[in-house]
Amino acid sequence: MLNEKYADLNAVAKALAEKYQQADPFPNIYLDEFFDPEYLKGVLGEFPDLEKVKDKIYYKNPNEDKLASKGEAQFGPNTRKLVHFLNSQIFLEFLQEVTGIEETLIPDPYFEGGGFHQIKPGGFLKIHVDFHKHRRMQLSRRLNLLIYLNEDWDESYGGHFELWEKDMSACALKIAPFFNRIAMFSTTGDSWHGHPEPLSCPPDRSRKSLALYYYTNGRPESELSKKDQDRITTTFRGRGGQDSAKMTVYNTAVNFANKVLPKSVIKLIKSKRNT
């Protein structure tokens, strides 16, 4: 299912490791034509309109307007085969070599927050850092892999994936969500990223992607303060002068709740949100 030029994953990993680990504003890389295009078209053919299926998550608040699948319920045979490969030993070892993460990478069989993602016209995902600990497995989140599934995507539609400077001073990199492009990056306390501008594609189009996340049992203390190690909710931050006051008020309330509510209550709220 890989494109022929990426067939030798061991050699590819060694060639990419330095570029990934030295990238700005934090370790990241994106690659085009990573998979066999015909195989990936089979995966795209299984992508449902998440708005019309029952088993989904709809994130709708000042920070996000997007749809996501739950677990493997919406995966067809091509998608299931693909994600199982991406969670296999051979691919985990590829990721380990590229990223330089020393702790053993562990896949997520529950696809917590992952799986199919769909953003309709007008939708967005504001700049954020991801939750740091898996709600069920209590493992530390270390790496995101995004696969874009948008054929004939015009850059005027928007939907660019943005990586921001660690101090949130500016956007450092924009990545268009073209078909058969993958993006991957290490997740820490300052790996700010998102798709902040409302999508402007035609009404019959949407931004489609497949997301996989990888974890380790613990992480270096240098990456996160001790109080943030166990955070199971996403942290959003407004872009200076570009995001609404409503978003700021909302985020202040959410962050306050994360500080004062018992962890068990936050887990319960998150579990209810995902049903």
Image (cartoon, helix red, strand yellow):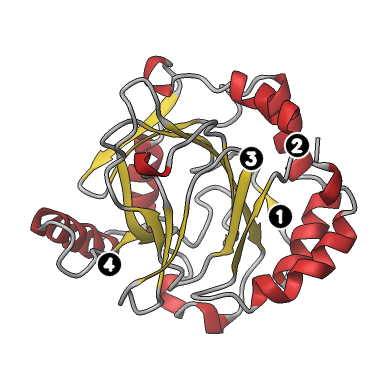
Q: Residue at x 43, y 38 (%)?
A: 154
Marks 3 and 2, how far apart in space? Answer: 18 Å
Callout 3–callout 2 Cβ contact below 8 Å: no
Tell which circle, 3 or 2, labels the residue nearer the N-terminal end.
2
Q: Nearer the N terminus, badge 2 or badge 1? A: 2
Q: What is the three-letter code of the residue carrying label 1?
A: Ile
Q: CA distance from mark 1 to mark 3?
A: 24 Å
Secondary structure under the numbered disc 3 in the rendered image: loop
Instruction: Say which amino acid is labelled 3.
Output: Asn
Counting labels gives: 4
Residue 48 x %, y %? 50, 19
Q: Give the mark nearer the N terminus: 1 vs 3.
A: 1
Q: Are marks 1 and 4 in contact (CB under 8 Å)?
A: no
Foreground: disc 2 or disc 1 = 2
Answer few, some or many: residues within 10 Å of disc 4's Cα (few below 14, many 20 plus, some between 14 and 19): few
Residue 244 place in picture, x, y as percent? 12, 56
Residue visible at 39% across and 15% down in the picture: 52
Q: Are marks 1 and 3 in contact (CB under 8 Å)?
A: no
x, y percent for residue 210: 57, 38
The local secondary structure at tag 2 comes to helix
Residue 37, given in percent of the width and then of the height, sits at 72, 32
Lower sequence index among marks 4 and 2: 2
Q: How far apart are labels 4 and 2 at the CA level?
A: 37 Å
3 vs 4, front mark: 3
The residue under label 4 is 259
- Of residues 88 and 4, the one nearer the viewer is 4
Question: Is the residue marked by circle 1 packed among few (<14), some (14-19), or many (20+) residues within 10 Å?
Answer: some
Please give the residue where the numbered disc 3 appears in the rendered image: 180
Mark 1 vs 4, N-terminal side = 1
Give the position of the C terminus as an image quadrant: top left
User: Which quarter of the figure has residue 159?
Assistant: top left
